[in-house]
Image (cartoon, rainbow, N blue to C red):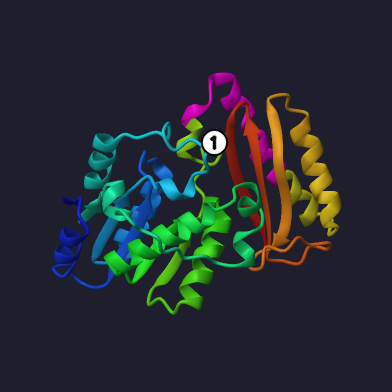
Amino acid sequence: MKVVETIAEMRRLRLELTEPVGFVPTMGYLHDGHLALVKRARAENPSVVVSLFVNPTQFGPQEDFASYPRATRRDLTMLEKGKTDIVFMPSVAEVYPPQFDSWVEVGKISQRLEGAARPAHFRGVTTVVAKLFNIVQPAKAYFGQKDAQQVVVIRKMVTDLNMNLEVVTCPTVREPDGLAMSSRNTYLNPEERRAAVVLYESLKLAQRQWSQGEKDAAKLRQTMTALIQKQPLATIDYVSIADNETLEELDKVKPPALVSLAVKIGKTRLIDNVILE
C-alpha cells in the first residue's frame, strides 16, 4: 500500500494501476461502514484507491470541522488490512491552493433536506468529489446509503457533467441495535448513545406502517415525529418522506420513496434513512 500526499504523485502512480480502478472517498476516522465500501471495491476492481481528506468546504461556520475526529495511523492500518493499493491523503492547501475559486454546484436536489439545513454543504461536497474524480480517474466510486442525499446529488453531477464512471451505492452498516455507523457517533456519551437508537426505531416504524398499507406520507411523518419526541435528548431537524430521485416531499407514498431524518441527540447531529420499495 502506498500513501500519497500530492496530486502530482497520485497522478503518477495512477498510471501504474491495473484497470479498472475502484475509488472510495472518505473523511477518515474509518469504521466498518467505510471498510464495507473498501471490501466491495476490492471485490469488483483489480485496483483500489481510498482518499482520506476532511473537506473544510462542506462544513458551515458553526459546524465541527476543527473537532471532526481524526485517527490517521489507525485508518492506514485498517486500509492496509483491506488491501488498498493507494491511500490519497492530501493537505487542505493541496486541494484548495491560494486563489482557488471554482465550484461545482448541483441544482434543486442539493437545496432540499441537508441542503436546506446546511447551506453550501453540497457545494463543498460536489466540488471536492469532482476534484477527486478528476485526480483518481476511477471506473467506479463507492458511497454508503447512509448519506442518501449525497449519493443522489453525486449521481446527478456525474450524469449531468458526463463523468465517465459508475457511482455504486452500498447498504448502510449498522451497530447491533440498529444505529447507523458514523464517525460522529464518537461524540455521544453513554446516555446519548442509548437515546440515538430512536432514529432507526422511527424509520422501522414507518416501514412497518407502510408495509401494513399506510400510504399517507403526512401520517407516517407524524408517527415518526411522535416517537422521536418521546426521547427527551432528541431534537428534530427534519423528518422527510420524499421521492428517491427528485427528493420532493410526497403526499402519497410511491415506491421507491426515501424516508430520511436528521435529529440532534444532545449536541450531536445524526442522519439516517431507509428506502420504501
Report x, y in % for residue 207. 72, 51
* Residue extent of the magenta highlight: 186-203
Identify which residue, 174 or 93, lies in the foreground: 93
Q: Is residue 268 left or right of residue 184?
A: right
Q: Residue at x 22, y 59 (%)?
A: 7
Residue type, label 1: Gln
Report x, y in % for residue 243. 70, 65
Q: For numbered disc 1, what is the local secondary structure?
A: loop
User: Local crowd at mark 1 within 10 Å, few (<14), some, or many (≥20)?
Assistant: few
Residue 187 in sight here? yes
User: Which corner quadrant holds the C terminus?
Assistant: bottom right
Q: Residue furthest bottom?
A: 162
200 w.r.t. 266: above or below: below
Report x, y in % for residue 151. 52, 61
1 w.r.t. 189: above or below: below
Count of all numbered marks drawn on residues in the image: 1
263 w.r.t. 44: above or below: above
Q: Residue at x 29, y 40 (%)?
A: 75
Residue 145 in sight here? no
Q: Residue at x 33, y 66 (%)?
A: 44
Identify which residue, 193 or 149, lies in the foreground: 149
Quarter occupied by residue 110 = bottom right
Q: Is residue 76 left or right of residue 108?
A: left
Q: Residue furthest front?
A: 99
The verdict on residue 192 being magenta is yes
Q: Which residue is mark 1?
A: 62
Quarter occupied by residue 115 = bottom right
Q: Main secondary structure of the magenta part?
A: helix
The verdict on residue 48 being magenta is no
Q: Residue at x 83, y 59 (%)?
A: 215
Report x, y in % for residue 176. 53, 35
